[in-house]
Amino acid sequence: MTSEAASRAGAVLEIDLGAIVANWRTLAGMTAPAQCAAVVKADAYGLGARPVAQALADAGCPLFFVATLDEGIALRRQLGTQPEIAILNGPHPGTAGEFAAHQLVPVLNEPGQVAEWTALGKSLRDNAPAAILQVDTGMARLGLTAREFAAVIEAPPPIVWRAVMSHLACSDNPGHELNKHQLACFTAAAARFPEVAASLSASCGIFLGRQYHFDLVRPGAALFGVNPCPGRAHPLRPVVRLQAKILQVRQIDTHQPVGYGAAHVMAAAGRIATVAVGYADGWLRSFSRRGCGFIAGMRVPLIGRVSMDLASFGVSAVPEAVAYPGAPIELLGPAYGVDDAAADAGTIGYEILTALGSRYHRVYRESALSPPK
């Protein structure tokens, strides 16, 4: 997009590719000799899978995880025959051949997927690509149950295993007893595949300790600026900055309502600034009366309800010289990161990122916004 496009846009979203790469390198260094992959599902958590994956591939990331077959095909067409690309949801019935055609590694999550991949291997004279086997160790989501896993061990299918994996349910809570239970269950499962790489940890799990690293870690949200250690200092770099342009500043009288439903009534006369960002842009309705922005480093409260295309902020305490039509209000940045925004919206940083809309003018930068906090 051109600078002309930026001037037309209601808000500008800066995405720091240099910070993403720096975060991946930090995590790779922490977990070595384990291999460090990158999870870029859901369009790299809303930040753009194409530029993000290219930056990470150029930095040496050897393995990417996405959620769906279509995501995998798009990434393979972009990156060429290397690096490896694994599909977390595995093959839907009848799609195994497409995995093989595009050199994609399926994560097999249930007996039907194992059977279909076995049949594919036989049809290709046992030349089907390797697969990853997922075992459920306590999340009751994807992965073989204990009984299904026992059946695979009893009658091993003729599949070349790239890895065996599981997923932690409570890794964002280091003290939760389920973490140790899942670790024990997965350690026992991985022992049945002594020559195969084992993978248990995603972003938060990496920070539970080296015993959770095994041979392969799968960070996703931590690469993109979400704090993998909730309640503690953020160990990684911020990645996004979102600045919305002020459309209008107006004086509001005492007792005058603001926005839909008259959800905010002015306790005293003051100024409000309205910006061109709303829930259609991923600025969640749950920010209503709870969120904030920053003008020239000064915090301004979000007042009234977030509507589809607009949100309003109280700017009475801000000098008129910095709050005027066309001036920016920073909605995300080093002073107010995705986790801060998530706390105000009553959600998690993952949702803040993946909700970021398509109407923002996106700018990809190569150097980090700032060092870690």
Image (cartoon, rainbow, N blue to C red):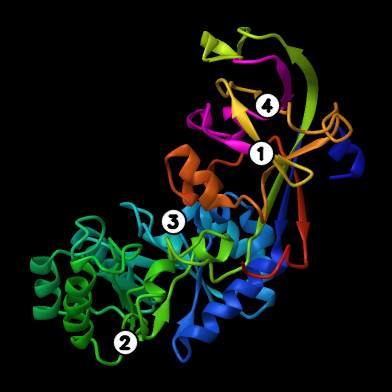
Q: Position of residue 223 (x, y in %)?
A: 56, 66
Q: Quadrant of the N terminus?
A: top right
Q: Quadrant of the C terminus?
A: bottom right
Cα distance between the residues tagged 3 and 4: 41 Å
The magenta-colored residue range is: 267-292
Residue with the mark numbered 3: 67
Labels 4 and 2: the sequence-earlier one: 2
Amino acid found under the numbered disc labelled 1 = Gly
Drawn side of residue 297 relative to residue 137, left or right: right
Residue with the mark numbered 2: 196
Amino acid found under the numbered disc labelled 4 = Gly
Q: Position of residue 17 (x, y in %)?
A: 70, 64
Cα distance between the residues tagged 4 and 2: 57 Å
Residue with the mark numbered 1: 293
Residue 145, located in which quarter of the rendered image?
bottom left
Q: Position of residue 31 (x, y in %)?
A: 46, 84
How would you rate the neighbour count of disc 3 (Cα within 10 Å): few for under 14, some for 14-19, many for 20 or more?
some
Residue depth check, mark 1 versus mark 3: number of the one nearer the observer: 1
- The reply to whether discs 3 and 4 touch (Cβ–Cβ < 8 Å) is no
Q: Secondary structure at mark 4?
A: strand
